[in-house]
């Protein structure tokens, strides 16, 4: 019976009689004939939009048409589309609801039928070439009016669902030619208006942000996309609205409880072996996260002002209670100086209670990233982790963001999620110190480095991690920021990474250029060796650096032997290996200088095993006789550029998000019964 209902059949009267059809299905059948249905019934279109839409039947009917039938009924399909657009102007809300849902079925059904056809064929079948500009202009203006008006929130939701349906009907959104009309008749301001209203963004925020992210990615590498242009110049007040909605959305995925109490994500990550839990994680977190991450990336990448908004502080316990100061629309201070956000962040109206923890979108994003980056074995999780690191790359090379991250007057406690490991204790959240945010970024990078040395080695992610660290250190060197950070943890993580590369040389070289990563790591040490006196917090930090290099000299010795062996043989790795050989010159000079001194000190004092303090004393006493070579370009880096390096990644990511959005919109049949019940009393 359920199957009959879906097909538009009401019931069987007897075994010998044909089943009865719903009236709306009979009217659809009239549309799918050659004749104009309004000829015999002048009120046909008025009556149609008073009927409850049968989405399944209408879509199936469109999909089942053959080529000749399409040509035969094209005028009727064009007429249906035209009357749908006209119905959107009706005062009768039931008609508007049914028109929106009919349009959704039309877009989906026609595209299903014309998967192999060009976009222009689809436009002709839906609207007609000669009327396309006018019809689509009317449609977009009506949707804009419904989204910006004071009408029902259900109608706004339905409009956004229709737009998401329209955007995602093709696997590759850049091949969806109908979107040209969405570019010409922009709804950018309508989307921002939804996000600026407290009640609207609570109900429609997710759909609005995802829609904006997808529209920004329409033919972004081929032509001028007005949504990119508008997002890149949007003022700070509106950007803040996007910022707030993203924070709310990230809160959905953030484990707000302490790890000891076990939250949603800690439960999932502790039960990786369970197929059911893995399934749940796939549905609840992974694919939808990609869409929000993409939106955040586009805002950070395209809009310079958004970086200052990332730092907007508020009390973590009550976001709405904190007054918001409006930022200037354009930066008023030169690059590398105090960003305008710091004046706002130092607002005396912010809570002064030292026990009241404050937060911002950046903190939420770092916590969220620490969850996403724990498991990269699944393709979607790998993409999310890569996107998190790309966002952090954009932040790390922005002068204003760096100024905020390193501001010693702005300290935060950031409870990052740490992967359970046998050889380390779980850190208690209450013991987390309050520090500049850059410490949390470095902690996140260290955490990734020590937890992903595995068979399926994520080389790309490691490269991005090391580059982020390098960019942050370049800023510290340039601005002489002496960050009080436990640098030894970073040095230890980097040395262990080199050790892992050496232990798995054969396996890794079959897939990756490990010499590129090794060079980046060695050059990080060269940054500390060459410029450490400009950014390490104390002279003893410099001593500890040398101590770590000498203590772990075997790793550097083995690395030198390996790269020397490869660089002296003919092969594809000869050149990259030789670069590592040259980069190791100062590290080897330190080892070769201090090791004999330490051995001599032990022999003279008859000590078999020197303590750390004794080794440090030898190091301090022998700096004067150490000779190092000046290496050029250590504090230079290639700035992030999406095109061409990241183009393939973003194209596939957008395709994945689009497919997922399409699936969710089609599964959620636009809440027909709820909508009709809401408007049934409206005349």
Image (cartoon, helix red, strand yellow):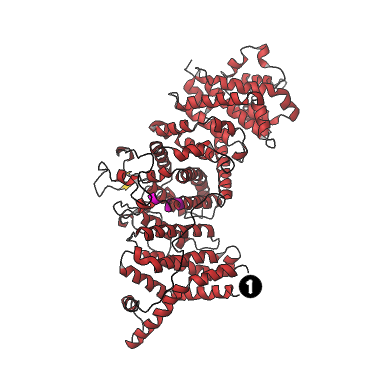
The residue shown at (36%, 81%) is 609
Q: Which residue is mark 1?
A: 570
The residue shown at (33%, 68%) is 541
Decide: is 369 above or below 121: below
**Count of numbered marks:** 1
Q: Seen in the image, is 600 located left or right of residue 19?
A: left
Decide: is 254 above or below 440: above
Residue 316, magenta (yes or no): no
Q: Main secondary structure of the magenta part?
A: helix
Is residue 207 visible in this depiction of the protein?
yes
Q: Seen in the image, is 186 located left or right of residue 607?
A: right
User: Where does the image place residue 315, in percent across and percent down from the top left?
Assistant: 31, 44
User: Where does the image place residue 12, in percent across and percent down from the top left?
Assistant: 66, 22
Q: Quadrant of residue 15?
A: top right
The one nearer the camera, 543 or 75, is: 543
Count neighbours of disc 1 (C-alpha within 10 A) and say few if under 14, some if 14 to 19, many if 20 or more.
few
User: What quarter of the picture does the N terminus occupy?
Assistant: top right
User: Where does the image place residue 447, in percent across and percent down from the top left?
Assistant: 43, 59
Q: Which residue is farthest right?
A: 68
The one nearer the camera, 371 or 677, is: 371
The residue shown at (45%, 45%) is 300
The one nearer the camera, 649 or 424, is: 649
User: Where does the image place residue 522, in percent across and percent down from the top left?
Assistant: 47, 67
Is residue 669 visible in this depiction of the protein?
no
Describe the element under mark 1 as helix, strand or loop: loop
Decide: is 440 above or below 5: below
Extent of the magenta region: 393-400
Residue 395, magenta (yes or no): yes
The one nearer the camera, 230 or 627, is: 627
């Amino acid at each position: 019976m359920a199957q009959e209902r879906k097909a538009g059949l009401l019931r069987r009267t007897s075994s010998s009689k044909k089943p009865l059809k719903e009236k709306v299905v009979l009217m659809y059948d009239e549309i799918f004939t050659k004749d104009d249905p309004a000829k015999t019934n002048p009120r046909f279109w008025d009556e149609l939009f008073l009927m409850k839409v049968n989405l399944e039947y209408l879509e199936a009917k469109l999909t089942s048409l053959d080529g000749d039938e399409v040509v035969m009924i094209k005028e009727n399909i064009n007429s249906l589309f035209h009357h749908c657009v006209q119905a959107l102007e009706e005062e009768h809300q039931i008609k508007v609801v049914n028109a929106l849902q009919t349009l959704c079925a039309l877009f989906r059904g026609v595209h299903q039928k014309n998967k192999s056809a060009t976009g222009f064929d689809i436009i002709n079948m839906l609207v007609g070439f000669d009327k396309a500009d006018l019809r689509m202009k009317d449609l977009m203006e009506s949707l804009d009016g419904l989204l910006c008006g004071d009408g029902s929130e259900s109608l706004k939701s339905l409009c956004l669902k229709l737009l998401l349906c329209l955007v995602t009907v093709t696997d590759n959104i850049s091949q969806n030619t109908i979107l040209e009309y969405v570019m010409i008749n922009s709804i950018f301001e309508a989307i921002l208006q939804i996000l600026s209203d407290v009640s609207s963004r609570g109900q429609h925020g997710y759909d609005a942000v995802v829609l904006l992210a997808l529209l920004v990615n329409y033919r972004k590498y081929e032509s001028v996309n007005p949504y990119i242009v508008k997002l890149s110049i949007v003022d700070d007040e509106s950007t803040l609205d996007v910022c707030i909605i993203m924070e709310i959305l990230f809160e959905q995925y953030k484990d707000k409880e302490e790890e000891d109490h076990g939250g949603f994500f800690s439960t999932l990550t502790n039960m990786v072996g369970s197929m059911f839990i893995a399934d749940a994680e796939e549905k609840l977190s992974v694919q939808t996260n990609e869409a929000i991450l993409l939106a955040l990336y586009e805002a950070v990448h395209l809009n310079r002002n958004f970086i200052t908004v990332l730092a907007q502080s508020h009390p973590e316990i009550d976001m709405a209670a904190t007054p918001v100061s409006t930022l200037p629309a354009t930066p008023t201070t030169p690059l590398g100086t105090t960003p305008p956000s710091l004046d706002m962040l130092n607002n005396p109206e912010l809570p002064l209670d030292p026990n009241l923890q404050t937060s911002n979108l950046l903190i939420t994003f770092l916590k969220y990233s620490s969850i996403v980056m724990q498991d990269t074995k699944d393709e979607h999780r790998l993409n999310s982790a890569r996107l998190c690191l790309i966002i952090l790359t954009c932040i790390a090379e922005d002068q204003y963001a760096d100024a905020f991250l390193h501001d010693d007057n702005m300290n935060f406690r950031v409870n990052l999620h740490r992967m359970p490991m046998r050889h380390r204790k779980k850190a208690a959240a209450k013991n987390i110190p309050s520090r500049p945010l850059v410490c949390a970024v470095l902690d996140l990078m260290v955490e990734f480095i020590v937890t992903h040395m595995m068979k399926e080695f994520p080389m790309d992610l490691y490269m991005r991690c090391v580059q982020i660290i390098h960019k942050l250190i370049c800023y510290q060197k340039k601005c002489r920021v002496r960050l009080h950070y436990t640098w030894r943890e970073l040095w230890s993580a980097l040395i262990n990474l080199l050790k892992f590369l050496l232990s798995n040389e054969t396996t890794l070289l079959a897939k990756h250029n490990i010499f590129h990563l090794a060079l980046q790591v060695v050059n990080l040490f060269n940054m500390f060796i060459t410029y450490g006196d400009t950014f390490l917090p104390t002279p003893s930090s410099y001593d500890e650096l040398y101590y770590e290099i000498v203590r772990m000299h075997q790793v550097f010795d083995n690395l030198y032997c390996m790269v020397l062996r490869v660089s002296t043989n003919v092969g594809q790795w000869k050149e990259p290996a030789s670069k590592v050989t040259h980069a190791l010159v100062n590290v080897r000079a330190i080892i070769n200088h201090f090791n004999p001194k330490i051995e001599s000190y032990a022999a003279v004092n008859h000590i078999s095993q020197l303590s750390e303090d004794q080794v440090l004393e030898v190091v301090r006493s022998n700096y004067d006789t150490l000779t190092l070579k000046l290496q050029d370009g250590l504090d230079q880096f290639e700035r992030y550029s999406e095109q061409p390096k990241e183009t393939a990644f973003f194209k596939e990511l957008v395709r994945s998000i689009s497919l997922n959005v399409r699936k969710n919109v089609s599964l959620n049949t636009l809440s027909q019964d709820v909508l009709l019940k809401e408007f049934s009393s409206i005349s």
